[in-house]
Amino acid sequence: MAAWKEGNVASTVHQVPVVAAASGLKLEPISTRLKRRLVHSNRKGNLYGLSYSPGGKRIVSADYPGGTIQMWDSESGRQLTKIEAGSGYRASTQVFFISPDWKTLYTLPRQERKYTMFEKGGERWIRWEFEGSARAWDLSTGELRTTYQQSGRGIFAIDLSPDGSTLVSGEDLSGETKERPPREATLWDLRTGQGRPLGRDLSIPLSFSPDSKRFAATSYDEKRQIMGLRLFDVATSKQEASLSLAEKSALITSIAFSPDGKLLVGQVRAAKGGAHSLKFWDATSLKELGSIDADPGDFFHEMTFSPDGLMLAVGNQQAPQSKLFLVDVSAKRLKATIVLGDKGLVRKPAFSPDGRRLAAISQHLPNLRPFPELRAEESPQGRVHLIDPTSGQMRETLVLPQGFPGSACFSPDGKTLATTGQGELLLWDVTGL
């Protein structure tokens, strides 16, 4: 059982060695709550991104960097659609976005980039050439519908508004420069297919407000140091507010609107020492309303609001211990710290639809070799920690198969938890928790 302390939860998992893996690791039995495996066409691929349809009958995920997106019938496990978005590394593992009506899927293919070094006026210059488009697919048939692209530009990132009416893209521009190529952002009206420029100093991904009427984006300087925040009106593309960080060279690493759209939360990394903090801003004026500092050695990484917006769950990564932080949003203070295990990865937490349960994936990754070179059969088994967010108590810890679990998502009825695995989706029965 997990031990509970005010402001802190320590969780332990009894380890039962069963069989030795190829790397010499002792493997444990997979939790018996596993009820179904949905097999991806790339059995060796790492799956990222996970979405249930509103009724829970369909589920979608993609392998990365393979770029094959699959949709399954969540009850039978039958494959319904397969879309090839193109293999290759991207600015984000978020390969796809789905419209609210579940009719259209938007993808980000691999950006094609070429560069040539040459001399000009006795100085070194670079000639850049970019290609890359955002694409809209029929989710039921897998057929390509529309391509969004501008000549001489390569789209490296996209984001979709919650109402599915607007797509924003980040683009690298072809041309000649002494250093990095310039970047611009474009706002696409998906009803007309028309794009509107947003300027050259915005970073993608960004965050749309829940009503899709505004969006917030981080801004960067000529060295691409993310050092500010800007708020835009979607209908007019006009800037409504902006702020610059007080500390020079501090970075904003992630931002998110609260479910009611009144609050904007950002993760900020200090220039000196790299200390992390959570900043709370008014979502209209960008006035700072509060701040939470991480302890030395900790830093904030992935974050998720509860459905009612009263709590924020935040993970860390590669700190001395893997932790999950529970934040009281109204008080803007840290409510509890849950220790999930040794140094490793903590993926983005997932709340159940009723907000009564919280799932957090952790995985201890020893320094066997650099992460991109680590094979699935060498990886320690991950864990899914099921937590009561009100009390902070650990309800149960699920032992996963070997591989690199990237995402977790509850079904709309809250009875099933889906997690991504090595070439497969894993569906867990979480009734009674």
Image: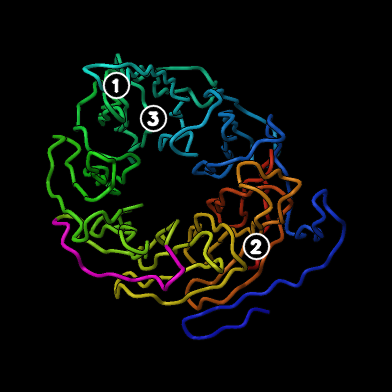
Query: Left or right of 32: which side holds 308?
Result: left
Q: Which mark is residue 125?
A: 1
Tag 3 or tag 1, which sits nearer the N-term?
A: 1
Comes first in the chain, label 2 or label 1: 1
Q: Give amino acid for label 3.
A: Phe
Q: Residue at x 71, y 71 (%)?
A: 13
Three-letter code, disc 2: Thr
Residue farthest to the right, as pictured: 19
Q: Which residues are magenta?
A: 285-299
Q: Is residue 233 above or below residue 351?
A: above
Provide residue 127's location: percent of width, then percent of height.
Answer: 32, 17
Relative horizontal placement of residue 96, taking residue 160 as reference (left or right): right
Between label 2 and label 1, give the one nearer the viewer: 1
Where, quadrant-wise, is the C terminus in this rendering? bottom right
Q: CA distance from mark 2 to mark 3?
A: 40 Å
Label pair 2/3, CB-CB below 8 angstroms: no
Mark 1 vs mark 3: give the one in front.
1
**Residue indicated by mark 3:** 156
Question: In 3D space, how far apart are the residues under numbered discs 1 and 3 (Cα atoms)?
Answer: 22 Å
In the image: residue 325, left or right of residue 384: left
Q: Is residue 95 visible?
A: yes
Residue linked to disc 2: 431
Give residue 256's position: percent from left, percent from top. 33, 53
Q: Quadrant of residue 131?
A: top left
For mark 2, give the secondary structure. loop
Cβ atoms at labels 1 and 3 below 8 Å apart: no
Q: How is the image coloured?
A: rainbow
Magenta: main secondary structure = loop
Q: Circle 3 sits in a helix, a strand or a loop, which is it? A: strand
